[in-house]
């Protein structure tokens, strides 16, 4: 066999190994609703350093997508619900969206886009049917646009749905079926996804079950197995995730979709903004979740594990708090990429913080020592500060809930001061406050210093090869070297 033929066949045999390098990768959600977002290149490095090979974006954020270019990370690009109506109205609009937000980033920046998420939980009960008429047509038009762009095989369309699209009348997973008001619509969507090689995406939140029901057994929300089990025939469930997921599997089977692949699009636990949103509970839940992912553990009804996109990567201080103050605190990292609590990942690796983050000056805005807390101007100042900055950590049961009155006021004023980049005059508040170089943080309550986004270089991917491609190139190099060495050695025999 000639040397070139030997190299060719060795690479062919090794190619599945290359594919295996990407299999079972950790996935996460990267939300970008932050007043001072981490630069994209720093986030991509954070993803790689912590073994996340898949990422889900809630919208086609240009900076995030450019930073993900040639990174080797698989990307699910989201379409916000407000875009569903125009996308449903015209396939031309869908084609334009795909051209601008999928094709361009694949061809120009080398972004590995694998999915388009059409909408985000559009059938949530609280929306009262607002998106029921537009979601399926938007999905159909996006699929048609992907096919026209030559991406029908490479990029799959999906619709991330909340777990409230299914229910169980007998309280057991085996009683699972889709909600009666959307049953026909769900069957249409799932059939369409199946016909086009797509997947069903479901968001499951045991925390929200606990938050909504004061009688929910708290141990059942975790994976420790210490909760009173739920017995369903021959199957015993010791945690809410498995019971919830298998309720979906039962619903799929009852409607003729036994083999429909499922992605868990969101699952996690927040750390602030609610008594049950704390570091201890988050660590307990998320470590149990990561253990399942690393063990490739499925559920009793479907042993094959689904792809899971953990929620979330980084806190988002500008996210809507309509569901609750905890909405801004889902990250396993704080706003600046620092680690919140230890987690053990693949091969015993702990979380790695973000590198290269630059901050504003080490100074804080606090209530002046001369100001009385009875000053009539304080209430308006605090209300103004919290209107434009994140004060959710001051709520009941939150990390800054135990501050005294003066510190409570100072926290709010400092949040505003940091959000407006410590601008001159932004700590005046009618002469009620002053700046200080002494960190006023207390216990669990951290007085933040914001990221200096102006000092960071523009977030553009350096053009270096992605991690998976680097590994593949290394394999290629080793194979070629081995063959060449073998050839050279045989020449001397």
Image (tube, helix red, strand yellow):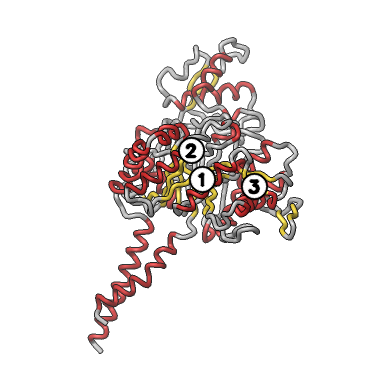
Q: Which residue is mark 1?
A: 189
Residue at 37 percent across and 51 percent down: it is 152
Q: Which residue is mark 3?
A: 177
Q: Residue furthest bottom?
A: 493
Residue at 59 percent across and 49 percent down: it is 286
Depth check: give the residue in front, 186 or 365. 186
Cα separation, mark 1 vs mark 3, equals: 15 Å
In the image, residue 231 above or below residue 127: below
Expressed as whole percent of the image width and height from the top left, the position of residue 104 reads: 30, 44
Q: Residue furthest left?
A: 491
Task: Tell me the crowding category of disc 1: few under 14, some 14 to 19, or many 20 or more residues within 10 angstroms, Cα based.
Answer: some
Say the numbered circle drawn on residue 238.
Answer: none
Residue 46 in sight here? no
| Residue 108 as seen in the image, left or right of residue 261 | left
Q: Secondary structure at mark 1?
A: helix
Expressed as whole percent of the image width and height from the top left, the position of residue 7 reads: 29, 74
Residue at 32 percent across and 68 percent down: it is 476
Q: Give yes or no for contact between labels 2 and 1 (Cβ–Cβ under 8 Å).
A: yes
Cα separation, mark 2 vs mark 1, equals: 9 Å
Cα separation, mark 2 vs mark 3, equals: 20 Å
Q: Secondary structure at mark 2?
A: helix
Sequence-first tag of 2 and 1: 2
State the quadrant of the C terminus. bottom left
Q: Which residue is mark 2?
A: 135
């Amino acid at each position: 066999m000639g040397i070139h033929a030997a190299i060719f066949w060795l690479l062919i045999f090794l190619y599945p190994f290359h594919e295996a390098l990407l299999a079972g990768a950790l996935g996460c959600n990267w939300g970008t609703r932050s007043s001072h977002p981490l630069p994209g290149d720093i986030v991509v490095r954070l993803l790689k350093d912590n073994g996340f090979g898949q990422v889900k974006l809630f919208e086609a954020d240009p900076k995030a997508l450019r930073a993900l270019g040639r990174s080797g990370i698989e990307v699910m690009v989201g379409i916000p619900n407000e875009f569903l109506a125009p996308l449903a109205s015209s396939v031309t609009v869908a084609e334009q969206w795909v051209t601008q937000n999928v094709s361009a980033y694949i061809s120009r920046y080398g972004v590995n886009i694998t999915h388009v998420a059409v909408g985000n939980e559009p059938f949530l009960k609280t929306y009262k049917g607002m998106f029921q008429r537009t979601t399926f047509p938007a999905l159909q038009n996006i699929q048609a646009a992907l096919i026209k762009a030559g991406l029908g095989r490479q990029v799959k369309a999906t619709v991330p749905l909340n777990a409230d699209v299914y229910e169980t009348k007998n309280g057991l997973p085996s009683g699972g079926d889709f909600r009666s008001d959307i049953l026909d619509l769900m069957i249409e969507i799932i059939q369409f996804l199946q016909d086009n090689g797509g997947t069903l995406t479901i968001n499951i939140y045991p925390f929200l079950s606990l938050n909504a029901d004061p009688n929910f057994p708290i141990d059942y929300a975790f994976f420790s197995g210490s909760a009173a089990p739920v017995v369903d025939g021959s199957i015993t469930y010791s945690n809410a995730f498995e019971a919830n997921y298998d309720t979906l599997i039962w619903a799929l089977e009852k409607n003729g979709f036994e083999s429909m692949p499922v992605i868990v699009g969101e699952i996690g636990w927040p750390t602030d903004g609610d008594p049950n949103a704390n570091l201890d509970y988050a660590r307990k839940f998320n470590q149990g979740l990561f253990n399942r992912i690393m063990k490739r553990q499925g559920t009793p009804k479907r042993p094959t594990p689904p792809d899971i996109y953990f929620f979330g990567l980084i806190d988002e201080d500008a996210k809507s708090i309509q569901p609750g103050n905890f909405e801004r605190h889902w990250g396993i990292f704080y706003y600046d990429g620092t680690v919140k609590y230890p987690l053990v990942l693949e091969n015993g690796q702990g979380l790695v913080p973000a590198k290269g983050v630059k901050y504003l000056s080490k100074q804080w805005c606090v209530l002046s020592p001369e100001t009385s807390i009875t000053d009539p101007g304080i209430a308006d100042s605090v209300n103004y500060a919290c209107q434009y900055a994140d004060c959710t950590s001051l709520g009941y049961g939150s990390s800054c809930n135990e501050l005294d009155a003066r510190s409570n006021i100072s926290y709010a004023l400092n949040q505003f001061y940091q959000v407006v980049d410590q601008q001159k005059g932004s700590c005046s508040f009618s002469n009620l406050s002053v700046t200080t170089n002494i960190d006023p943080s207390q216990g669990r309550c951290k007085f933040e210093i914001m990221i200096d986004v102006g000092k960071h270089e523009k977030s553009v991917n350096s053009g270096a090869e992605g991690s998976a491609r680097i590994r593949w190139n290394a394999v290629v190099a080793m194979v070629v070297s081995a063959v060449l060495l073998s050839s050279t050695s045989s020449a001397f025999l």
